[in-house]
């Protein structure tokens, strides 16, 4: 199994970074291959809505997404860690997700191949897991991030199979003050790596 961990926070070593570190440690313990993507380190342009990928399944914009596409295509599992900003994933993560329209179109253009690949990986293709943290306590605090990630996974030919979303983590390193939460992340990573 091959997993891609997407670090979606613009801030290094914060809560969601630590959550994903623990999750991926748990996955590695199960013996899987892990690739990482730090969105904050990428030079990305937004989708320009040109429709170029409609014909080819390839994005016409040449930037760091060209390095990310193969990782997402090869992955059996995708784990996204993003804090919640204004009730959704960070802008950097949304930029990456929007640019995956090219992968969606590639999947549509190669529908027979996509069905074959999904069948070889199980009935649902790629598996996704969402890790998120937010400062407040709102009842629907993670709804938009959950929905965005659900449809991101759907576009890649997979499904979201789990999540850990923690409220009331306002300080940059608050999650480190609660080892039980990081232990949960590690355990979920280990479980995620054992389909």
Image (spheres, grey):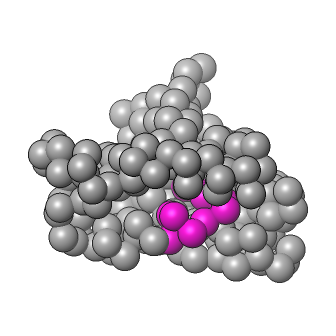
* Residue 140 horizontal/vertical position (percent): 55, 21
Image quadrant in which the N terminus is located:
bottom right
Image quadrant in which the C terminus is located:
bottom right
Residue in front for this viewpoint, 30 or 107:
107
Residue sitting at x 65%, y 76%: 34
Residue in front for this viewpoint, 96 or 104:
104
Q: Is residue 76 left or right of residue 29?
A: left
Res. 123 image quadrant: top right
Is residue 78 one of those drawn in magenta?
yes
Q: Is residue 142 left or right of residue 76?
A: left
Res. 4 image quadrant: bottom right
- Tell me if residue 179 comes above or below residue 24 in the rendering: above
- Tell me if residue 195 comes above or below residue 101 in the rendering: below
Q: Is residue 93 left or right of residue 37?
A: left
**Which span is picked out in magenta?**
71-81
Residue sitting at x 18%, y 44%: 51
Residue sitting at x 60%, y 66%: 75
- Tell me if residue 67 comes above or below residue 6 in the rendering: below
Whether residue 187 is visible to the viewer of this picture, yes or no, is no
Residue in front for this viewpoint, 182 or 73:
73
* Residue 165 horizontal/vertical position (percent): 65, 41
Whether residue 8 is visible to the viewer of this picture, yes or no, is yes
């Amino acid at each position: 199994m091959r997993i891609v961990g997407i670090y979606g926070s613009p801030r290094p070593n914060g809560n969601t970074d630590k959550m994903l570190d623990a999750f991926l440690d748990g996955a590695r313990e199960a013996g899987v291959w892990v690739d990482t993507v730090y969105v904050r380190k990428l030079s990305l342009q937004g989708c320009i809505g040109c429709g170029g990928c409609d014909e080819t399944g390839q994005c016409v914009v040449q930037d760091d997404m060209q390095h990310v596409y193969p990782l997402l295509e090869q992955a059996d599992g995708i784990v996204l860690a993003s804090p919640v900003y204004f009730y959704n994933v960070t802008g950097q993560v949304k930029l990456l997700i929007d640019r995956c329209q090219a992968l969606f179109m590639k999947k549509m253009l190669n529908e027979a191949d996509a069905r074959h690949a999904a069948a070889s990986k199980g009935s649902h293709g790629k598996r996704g897991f969402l890790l998120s943290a937010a400062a407040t306590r709102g009842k629907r605090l993670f709804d938009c991030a959950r929905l965005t990630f659900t449809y991101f996974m759907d576009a890649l030919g997979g499904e979201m199979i789990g999540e850990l979303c923690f409220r009331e983590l306002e300080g940059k390193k608050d999650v480190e003050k609660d080892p039980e939460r990081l232990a949960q992340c590690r355990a979920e990573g280990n479980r995620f790596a054992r389909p």
